[in-house]
Amino acid sequence: MTEKILVILKENKDFISGEKIAKLLNVSRAAVWKNISKLKNMGYNIISVTNKGYLLVENNFLFNKLEIEKELNTFVLGKNIYFFEEINSTNDYAKKLINSNIEIEEGTLIVADCQTSGKGRLDRKWESNKGDGIFLSLILKPDIELFSIMQVTLLAGICVCKAINSITGLNAKIKWPNDIIINNKKVCGILTEVNAQIDKVSYIILGIGINVNNQKFDVALGDKATSIFLETNKNIERQKIIANLLKEFENNYFKYIKEKDFSIFLDEYKSLCININQVCKLIYHKKEIIGKVIDISPLGEIIFETENEILKIVSGEVSLRSINGNYI
Ligand code: ADP
């Protein structure tokens, strides 16, 4: 009911009485009052005036479960949402859900406004300050082989780029395998974790962190990181990006699950990937190899040419760095 009252308040540009809301929803005035208090506690600025009723002062930047639900136009992804103002890590919460006795549906979405121990790959820290970013995890249950998880991650990279680019007009690109880059700086990281039996996947946890309204970053990140705000000078409603991303990903993910073939997305991935033809350093099992990325294979591996050989490398504990060791 809280959501329905919110919709009514948003639609009414003038005061609306509790009695009228109660009639519209066929509930008691006490129930209206209780839910208005709930909305106020969630941060909504609702003015109450005796004999006039309630008026919502719009603030597009409130970020909560209701605002996300209102934007979503997906069928499966985000049907169940767990929202937290603060959490250690949305991926860790997803793992907790999977290991609980609750039946977890495909597309369950965990979103937080802040993470206290956001992670990148290899347990590296992901800066996750309150109010600035998108921190989400999607729980997927694809019927695919373990090897193919990488392809789901690559697909998510394509969708993050498309969502950012369509909403902001920016030109986000992919650094293989799945860092999203704007003007040579990292705007998003994707961390996929898996729960598998033998070589079949039971669950994939697709964790996505996007820097949206950050005005600055920890000095330790130097100039490796950027945000949509830093690139456009505009604050963006995070729920809009989430909705666009989930819609894009839903279309492509189910196409992928049906065809079980990444090659249908290969041209698009390659057109977004910054590494092709790049001479760079590949860091692989603590070894560093200099070479050139000559292509991406239909399976999503990079094809890396060194002085003596051509290597095909699957993502995992691999990083690409520029020759001088910089991030790009
Ligand atoms: P890599 O960029 O080496 O592939 P990961 O994908 O594991 O690494 O991401 C973690 C790294 O990303 C951290 O070591 C840090 O350098 C960087 N990082 C941490 N938080 C952010 C952030 N909010 N935005 C951009 N980069 C970040």
Image: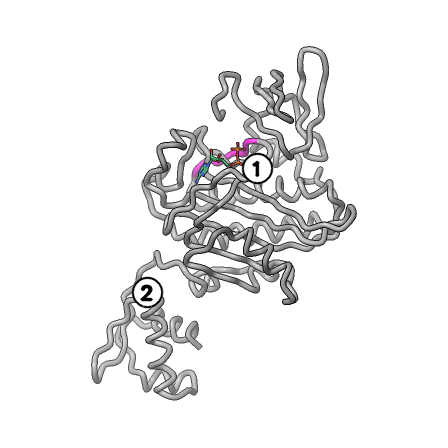
Q: Label 2 to label 1, Cα distance in Å?
A: 36 Å
In the displayed structure, does residue 112 sit left or right of residue 77? Answer: left
* Residue for badge 2: 43
* Badge 2: residue crowd in 10 Å (few <14, some 14–19, many ≥20): few
Magenta highlight on residue 263: no
Instruction: Depth check: give the residue in front, 88 or 25.
Output: 88
Asked if the beta carbon under badge 2 is closer than 8 A to the nearest atom of ligand 1, the reply is no
What is the three-letter code of the residue carrying label 2?
Gly
* Residue for badge 1: 122
Where's residue 313, x and y in %? 69, 28
Question: Taking 233 as reference, is 3 above or below it?
Answer: below
Where's residue 293, x and y in %? 63, 22
Residue at the extreme top of the image, as rendered = 307
Where's residue 72, x and y in %? 50, 60
Q: Would you identify the image quadrant in which residue 16 lies?
A: bottom left
What is the three-letter code of the residue carrying label 1?
Leu
The residue at 36%/66% (across/down) is: 42
Asked if the beta carbon under badge 1 is closer than 8 A to the nearest atom of ligand 1, the reply is yes
Q: Would you identify the image quadrant in which residue 19 lies?
A: bottom left
The residue at 57%/17% (across/down) is: 279
Q: Which residues are magenta?
A: 170-175
Q: Which of disc 1 and disc 2 is earlier in sequence? A: 2
| Number of callouts | 2
Judged from the image, the secondary structure of the residue bearing numbered disc 2 is loop
The residue at 57%/50% (across/down) is: 248
Judged from the image, the secondary structure of the residue bearing numbered disc 1 is helix
Magenta highlight on residue 171: yes
Where's residue 280, x and y in %? 57, 19
